[in-house]
Amino acid sequence: MSNEIILIAAVTVDGFIARHSNEITRWTKDLHLFKKQTMGHSIIMGSNTFNTLSNELLGREVIVVTRNDNPKEIINKTSSKKCFIAGGGKTNSRFYPFLTHIYITPHPHIFGKGIKLFSDQIGELELLFEKSVEVSKEDGIFQYQYKIKKC
Ligand SMILES: NC(=O)c1ccc[n+]([C@@H]2O[C@H](COP(=O)([O-])OP(=O)(O)OC[C@H]3O[C@@H](n4cnc5c(N)ncnc54)[C@H](OP(=O)(O)O)[C@@H]3O)[C@@H](O)[C@H]2O)c1
């Protein structure tokens, strides 16, 4: 099992990750960071997200989950040091009990409706700030990295 299970996402200021389930994401500015941070590690994503990808994620083990997969079993099988949970909202909710870190990049958009970071109800989590990484200073976009405090 990976040492770190990291949720990685770009969100709007009102907490959405997409306008709808099959949106091809074109509004995010942190793709270069996603590539750098996930390279050599495992990435877990839901089938809807996988279907929106236009490029293969080379150099990373990509695990696409469906409703028949058991999240705990999937996590137990991961072997890279870090395992990234890369959406969408449904998958983020299903894997939330296993998260150790969250890397979140708020973007200057408000969608008003859409797919939430966690589309199903989850419990509260307490986050400890670790660091921020500049994405685009002129656009005011930074990635915030948090460790999840285990209660
Ligand atoms: N901004 C970002 O950082 C970011 C990151 C990732 C994705 N996204 C966006 O998120 C959107 C997709 O999110 P999403 O939440 O619709 O999909 P998703 O999490 O990518 O995929 C849906 C997952 O939920 C499962 N599922 C469906 N119904 C279920 C049920 N009743 N019980 C248990 N599991 C069930 C699906 O399995 P089946 O295959 O069996 O249906 C699949 O594994 C896309 O627009 C994508 O572009 C944005």
Image: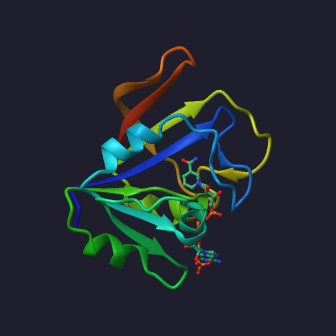
Q: How many marks?
A: 0
Q: Residue at x 38, y 35 (%)?
A: 145
Depicted 49 relative to depicted 8: above or below? below
Residue 38 placement, left or right of 106: left
Q: What quarter of the picture does the N terminus occupy? A: bottom left
In the image, farthest residue toward the right: 112
Residue 99 picture location, percent across and down: 38, 55
Residue 31 image offset from top left, x and y in percent: 47, 41
- Indicate the position of residue 69 as horizontal and vertical percent values: 46, 81
Is residue 149 shown to the viewer in this render? no
Most foreground residue, 53 or 109? 53
Residue 105 in view in this figure? yes
Q: Is residue 26 left or right of residue 131?
A: right
Quadrant of residue 28 in the image? top right
Relative depth, front residue between 51 and 90: 51
Report the colour scheme: rainbow
Q: Name the residue located 43 percent from the left edge and 31 percent from the top edge.
A: 144
Q: Residue furthest front?
A: 55
Q: Residue at x 55, y 80 (%)?
A: 67
In the rendered image, residue 17, in percent from the top left (x then y), is placed at: 62, 47
Kindly indicate the quadrant of the structure image that contains residue 139.
top right
Question: In the figure, 11 relative to 86: above or below?
Answer: above
Please name the residue shown 52% across and 57% down the image. Answer: 87
Q: Residue at the bottom extreme?
A: 68
Split into quadrants, the picture shows ligand 1 in the one at bottom right
